[in-house]
Image: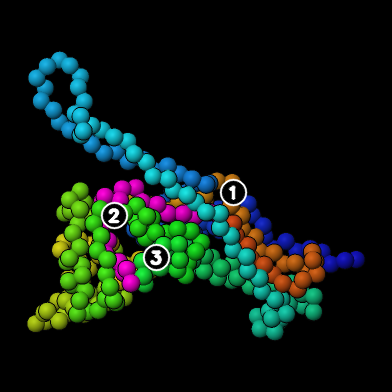
Amino acid sequence: MANATVGVGTYAGEAARPYVAAAVLSADTIANGYISVLENVHSKAVLRKFSGAAIQLNDDCAFTTPGSDQLTLGEAVLDAAALKVNEQVCNADLRATWESAQMRGQSSNAPADFTTFAAQYVAAKVAEGIENNIWHGKYDHTDGATGTGTYQSFAGLMAAIVAATPGEEDLLTGVTTSANILGRITALAVPNVIAGDPETKLFMSRAMKQLYYTALAGTQNLPFIAEGQANFFQGYDIITPAGMPDDTFLFAQKSNLYFGTNLLTDHINASVLDLQGVTGDDVTRVIMQFSGGCQIVDAAAIAVARRSS
């Protein structure tokens, strides 16, 4: 009798949600609520924004609009790219290295605890990839070019910001150091529409925050005072997402930065498959299918300093 096919686990639609959602939503930026997340985007989502509206003198009985200041409805389209994870491990390696006592004979399948570990590992790598693409996707922070760079799964927030022409932008040359970081941030004007708003945050990388702390410590007679000050800049909270690019400083609000995915649709999939009894290949595969993409709503309400060379 032929060996039975062992289905370690294949999940689609709602059944896949606990596995795919755990991977995607574990990305640092998403898990910490630094940006807005839409979980029901299959392909595209339209982000609406209002502008205009003004008070008028009520000196007659007519209904008149305020002319150039009248209420206007605009939109930005978030495109969610179809994404997949295809990984496999050789079962022979498992027999040699992964608790081989649990694997009986040359034709043994992967042990259950390994498949759990493999799924968890891949989920962690998915979270890492999502995080890096949210900020770096199709954007090279070293020269400011869009469409290039290490991460190409989908266009991230920096690519969207550059494409939309932000309200305030400084193009930096050369790397940021502790000697010049204060000047680089201070030179960036925050748009009036978000200036002084407690919801406005200053985003920078963790490496840049370290330089910021060093710069502050150098200005204090008691350097430990800089520890508390380094969490703020001119009253704005400093946010340091794991995937934030170096040499980049962004003033923005959560309501203006979006990530979209299809976690609440039927178009997601998660599988851990042993192929020995199916194709004869002595491998275990981990598969995930989902979508992801980024967009900003209002470029005028963003200030960014970034590398141009």
Q: Position of residue 194 (x, y in %)?
A: 21, 51
Instruction: Name the residue rendered at 40%, 68% in the picture.
Output: 140
Residue at 79 percent of width and 64 percent of height? 278
The magenta stretch is 290-309
Q: Residues within 10 Å of mark 2 (few under 14, many from 20)?
A: some
* Chief SS of the magenta region: strand
Q: Nearer the viewer, mark 1 or mark 3?
A: 3
Mark 3 neighbour density, 10 Å: few (under 14) some (14–19) many (20 or more) = some
Hey, what amino acid is under mark 1?
His
Report if residue 296 lies within the magenta region.
yes
In the figure, is residue 178 to the left or right of 126?
Answer: left
Q: Is residue 20 magenta?
A: no
What's the amino acid at mark 2? Answer: Pro
Which residue has dot 1 on it? 267
The residue carrying mark 2 is 166
If the image is split into quadrants, where does the N terminus sit?
Answer: bottom right
Marks 3 and 2, the one that precedes in the sequence: 3
Q: Residue at x 24, y 63 (%)?
A: 170
C-alpha gap between disc 3 and disc 2: 15 Å
For label 1, the SS is loop
Left or right: 55, with 78 as reference point = left
Q: CA distance from mark 1 to mark 3?
A: 32 Å
Q: Quadrant of the C terminus?
A: bottom left
The disc labelled 3 sits on which kind of residue? Answer: Ala
Q: Look at the picture and state if 37 lies above or below 90.
A: above
Does label 1 or label 3 sit earlier along the sequence?
3
Do callouts 1 and 3 mark residues in contact (Cβ within 8 Å)? no
